[in-house]
Image (cartoon, rainbow, N blue to C red):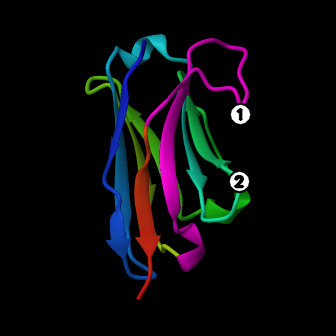
Amino acid sequence: QVQLVESGGGLVQPGGSLRLSCAASISIFSINIMAWHRQAPGKERELVAFIGSGSVTNYIDSVKGRFTISRDNAKNTVYLHMNSLKPEDTAVYYCAVAMGSSWSPVNMDYWGKGTLVTVSS
């Protein structure tokens, strides 16, 4: 079992910034994909960004240029730096990991419990 603990959510004004953290209970050297998903009220959960073991990253179009995903192998932690936040970014953000090379956003191996991000004035 891999435990994932998210932190860093909160209330922020439009245009503001937040940094989400996800600490893993194991060495992330053994993890292939680390990802952030989000679920907005009344909507399905969606993949926001992921980072591979080789630090290759990918983002959904709506956050490109505003969000940055990174990983700190020494701290077993993945981050999501969110800038220029918009009300439509309001959601519960979940950290998830895929251990192997065959993975899909809807079939991740382990999930965190989520952290709420609210963007509102």
Horizontal side of 93 relative to 47 (left or right) equals: left
Q: From the viewer's perspective, is residue 109 above or below residue 69?
A: above
Q: Position of residue 25 (x, y in %)?
A: 32, 20
Residue depicted at 71% across the width and 21% down the height: 103
Start-end of magenta stretch: 87-112
Does residue 92 show up magenta in the picture? yes
Please name the residue shown 69% across and 53% down the image.
Answer: 60
Residue extending farthest front: 42
Which residue shows up at 31% across the image and 54% down it?
8
Instruction: Please say whether residue 60 is one of the residues in the magenta stretch.
Output: no
Quickly name the residue at label 1. Answer: 106
Q: Quadrant of residue 40?
A: bottom right
Which one is in front, 113 or 62? 113
Q: Position of residue 4 (x, y in %)?
A: 38, 29
Pick whichever, 37 or 18, lies toward us.
37
Return the x and y of residue 73 as percentages of the image width and height.
34, 24
Residue under numbered circle 2? 44
Identify the image quadrant of the N terminus: top left
Whole-percent x, y for residue 74 in the image? 27, 23
Q: Earlier in the sequence, mark 1 or mark 2?
A: 2
Residue, x 60% and y 73% (percent of image)? 88
Residue at the far left in the pictured view:
75
